[in-house]
Image (tube, rainbow, N blue to C red):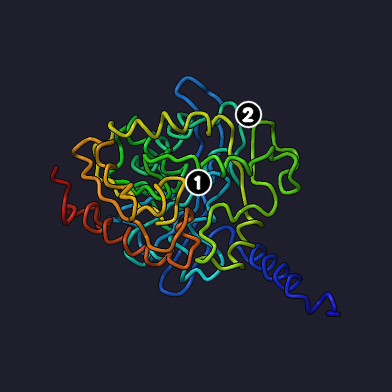
Amino acid sequence: MRSRSSSPVFALCLFVLAVALSLPSGAWGAEGGFRCEELSFDVNLSPGDPTVYSVFGVLCSRGAIERKTIQITLHGATYGHVYWDFPFQPETYSYVRRATAEGYAVLNVDRIGIGQSDRPPAAAVDIPANGYVVHQIVQALRGGDLVIPSFGRITAERVALVGHSLGSVISIQEAATYGDVDGMVLTGVSHTVTPVLNEIFAVLYPANLDPRFPGVPDGYLTTLPGTRDVFYYPPSRDPLVLAIDEETKETVTTAELDTAVPALFSSPGIHVPVFVIVGDYDLAFCGEPTCSASGSLAAEANFFAPDACVETAAIAGAGHDLNLHFQAPIAYDAVLEWMNRRVGSDSSAPAPSPCQP
């Protein structure tokens, strides 16, 4: 019989706790000029609602931000900003670190109602509200009034949205409604919505019944304990990643889920370059047996305006959570190759290959 201290499960729990405690706060830097600063944005949920809420974000860059395209990363349902800057093996799993190494600045946010951002009443947190919140953040980055100690005054000439799953749907909502971004990457979503998505919905339950979310208002949901594997293709994920995912899980509102499909199909209103990228085994948004074998992505361009110049990719061996599979670096390479061509990291220069429908 093993002692508790030598149990693999106990060791895993200690490791996960250590990772959670090591998550940085405030402002910080690392080798290679990588610097980040925490900040907050005062936002409203609609133009007619004067109530002010705070949205948390982390702005990261290697060196100065001046003349850099700023990417805003938007996580999916039951995730927070950790999804884009995962604390375990960041050289593999952190998109923020990979994108900043490519010459971009990244604003990685906890969406409204999530993590360190304020939690309004759940009924008020729908996809249109999310889109309006992101719009206000885009305008704050562009406006020239935002001054951050580590980086100085921010005046973004070029802004791109990079979403995952529900964050991709919110990106579509924002871009189709306000038309104020220069490009967008949509991961973990397509217009091929399959019944497998119901398997994800089936593991949701009221967040205020979960020990991680005491006192969360009614209408916020999270995943049942031990069910995070629903987001993965199991042969391609590390059990330590799965454990950290469980410990850092977040919430989604019923109103977000109820308004997601109409927002997804507002995509004809987008007139900037779009890249749709999914895991080949993301069967919630791909036909069986895989996305590539079924040809599910072939029709994606039909759901956007011609001047979106839609490009698509399916990452072999990956499931829904592209960032948290072994194939994450391959996905990041694909995203950044597209971003470099269609948007460009230097906002003072034209995109190397602008969209030509």
Camera-side residue of 310 and 84: 310
Q: Is residue 334 above or below residue 167?
A: below
Q: Quadrant of the N terminus?
A: bottom right
Amino acid found under the numbered disc labelled 2 = Pro
How far across and how far down the image is residue 277, in percent? Answer: 35, 52
SS of the residue under disc 2: loop
Disc sitting over residue 121 in the figure: 2
Task: Tell me the residue at 30%/41% (across/down).
Answer: 181
**Residue flagged by tag 1: what amino acid is it?**
Gly
Q: Quadrant of the C terminus?
A: top left
Using the rendered image of the protein, determine whether residue 156 is visible from the camera's viewpoint.
no
Coordinates of residue 185 in the picture (x, y in percent) = 34, 49
Q: Which residue is nearer to you in this view: 330 or 97? A: 330
Give how far apart the Cα atoms at labels 1 and 2 are. Answer: 19 Å
Q: Quadrant for residue 240, please give it.
A: bottom right
Give the image location of residue 317, x and y in percent: 43, 63
Of callouts 1 and 2, which one flags the residue occurring earlier in the amino acid sequence?
Answer: 1
Q: Relative to residue 281, is residue 116 drawn left or right?
A: right
Query: What residue appears at the point 43 percent right and 66 percent down from the top-left corner?
Result: 327
Q: Is residue 271 left or right of residue 248?
A: left
Disc 1: which residue: 76
Residue at the farthest left position: 356
Q: Residue at x 41, y 43 (%)?
A: 168
Residue at point 38%, 63% (across, down): 316
| Residue 321 x %, y % | 49, 55
Crowding at dot 1, Cα within 10 Å, few <14 / some 14-19 / many 20+, comes out as many
